[in-house]
Image: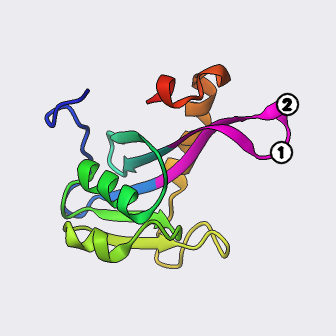
Amino acid sequence: MLTSQQIPTVGGHGIIVEVDESKFGKRKYNKGHAVEGVWVVGGVARTTDRELFLEVVEDRNAVTLTSVLKKHILAGSIIHTDCWKGYNSERIREFGCTHKTVNHAETYVAEDGTHTNTIEGNWRPMKAFIPKQKFSHNLIG
């Protein structure tokens, strides 16, 4: 278990943090929808260090996602997400961050430059690094 001093925090005043969630799971017989696995929420700061946080979550609702963001992102950050309903702008503003979204049904980079391409580009290498047999809550979390 991580202590409060060990929980990775990213961002800071005026720093953009891209946030996304991804299912780490495997398909039965490599067909159909993912039948087992875990949801992971991740964020990467757009700095030269590209600081990153990852957390396994039970679900992707607004309470869960807001709790993860509040724990890992410093006040004053600018948070970029997609338009998933779990990212609640009002709750994000309550802990001192600005929230901008990009609608992936329309574009991958919004007119104002908002995007989540950096964090989304990290999911594939992370998943390739973990053997598919390990995609369970006990082994990833």
Nearer to the camera, 54 or 49: 54
Q: Quadrant of residue 108?
A: bottom right
Q: Helix or strand or loop: what does disc 1 sit on?
A: loop
Residue 32 - label: 1
Question: Which residue type does callout 1 highlight?
Answer: Gly
Residue 29 - label: 2
| Residue 10 location (% of width, % of height) | 27, 47
**Residue at (63%, 27%) from the top-left corner?**
128
Q: CA distance from mark 1 to mark 2?
A: 8 Å
Q: Helix or strand or loop: what does disc 2 sit on?
A: helix
**Residue at (66%, 76%) from the top-left corner?**
106
**Residue at (46%, 61%) from the top-left corner?**
61
| Residue 48 location (% of width, % of height) | 33, 43
Q: Quadrant of residue 18?
A: bottom left
**Crowding at label 2, few (<14), some or many (≥20) Cα neighbours within 10 Å?**
few
Residues drawn in magenta:
20-39
Q: Is residue 84 left or right of residue 1?
A: right
Residue 54 - label: none
- Report if residue 28 lies within the magenta region: yes
Please determine whether, in this image, residue 136 is positioned above or below residue 59: above
Q: Is residue 129 left or right of residue 95?
A: right
Nearer to the camera, 105 or 61: 61
Labels 1 & 2 near each other (Cβ < 8 A): yes
- Report if residue 22 lies within the magenta region: yes
